[in-house]
Amino acid sequence: MPNGFVVVVVLCMIMMLTVLLLGFNYRCRGSLYAADGFRRSEQALNCAIAGVNIAVAAIKSTDDVCANSKLLKLFSAETVFPVGQGHCKVAVCEENGRLNVNLLKDTNGQLDRTRIDQFLRLIDLLNEQSTVDSHIGYGLVPSIIDWTDSDDEITRLPFVKYENAGAESAYYSSLYTPYQCRNKPLETIEELLLVKGITQQIYSRISNYITVSGDGMVNINCAPKLVIESLSEKIDPALAEIIIKRRKIKPFESITELQDVPGMTDSIYYEIHETITVRPADRYYHITSHGSSENVSHTTVAIVHRDTKSKTINMLMYKEVE
């Protein structure tokens, strides 16, 4: 009997040790997997950061990346740059080719009718483009104006029949999670998600066509097709496409060259010539870099400003997206 008891005790101890060893092995394997996952994630992130650095170096070395056919091809997100054991793909677009929503009022605090009308046309074009996504209302225009101006008076657009009123702090403080109206220019496009009427879905539709940087002059050499169409109600999709094809062959060196574009009439040219440029006073670039390593991906996004006089680069925004 005592011998049998000893055997049972020994067997129990062996079983307990086995369970402990299995648990220890499981935790060790989990830690190793976590460490390996962290290593691969860091490698992918470093590849993405390398892509941003490559783009910054190129932007610093040339006056206009978007007018340089060789660089533009490199930064089309189709060319793979090897980085160590991984790689990155980089896309660069010029912010000056978009509509600056910080300038919907002029320096005197008056509504800038030209830019507001362009924004309203852009909304119309986006609504015509898709019947599936949610409708974009005109109301977001006065709401953005109220968010970016310094006063606390609700903006109303007298030339818009419906949805013509903005919102100030009284509206935002009444929300379930209250906050104050910024009453300052936007620092990043993402801040628009705080503005009345702008949902994540609407933001995703408009974010590629607007900016918070630059002097407001639209660079015709890099403006997206819808931004070109929004410059005038007389510019149809065919004319916008001709302009894009022409600049791919050779970037416009002066805005007067637009007069030679088939379909460009004098009335259209003189309507838009004061709102466009081919040589922005300062350059703002949006960089997106996708880094990959061992089946793990990371994305980094940055907005940089290139001072055309000193040729220095200022990082205005940087964020990492897994």
Image: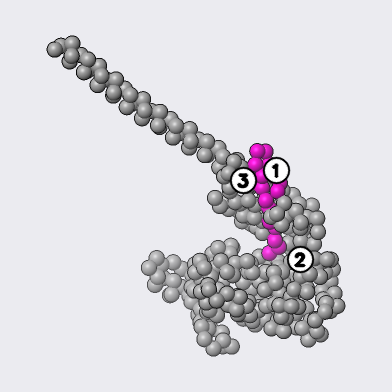
- Sort mark 3 into few (<14), some (14-19) or many (20+) by Cα contacts within 10 Å: many
| Left or right, residue 173 beside residue 45 | left
In percent of width and height, residue 297 lies at 58, 47
- Dot label at residue 82: 1
In percent of width and height, residue 239 lies at 76, 78
Write down the region rendered in magenta.
80-95
| Left or right, residue 5 beside residue 268 | left
- Sort mark 2 into few (<14), some (14-19) or many (20+) by Cα contacts within 10 Å: some
Question: Can residue 42 be seen?
Answer: no
Question: Can residue 162 be seen?
Answer: yes
Q: Is residue 89 magenta?
A: yes
- Dot label at residue 292: 3
Tell me the residue that label 2 is attached to.
281
Cβ–Cβ under 8 Å for marks 2 and 3: no
Q: Earlier in the sequence, mark 2 or mark 3?
A: 2
Say what amino acid the circle numbered 2 marks: Ala
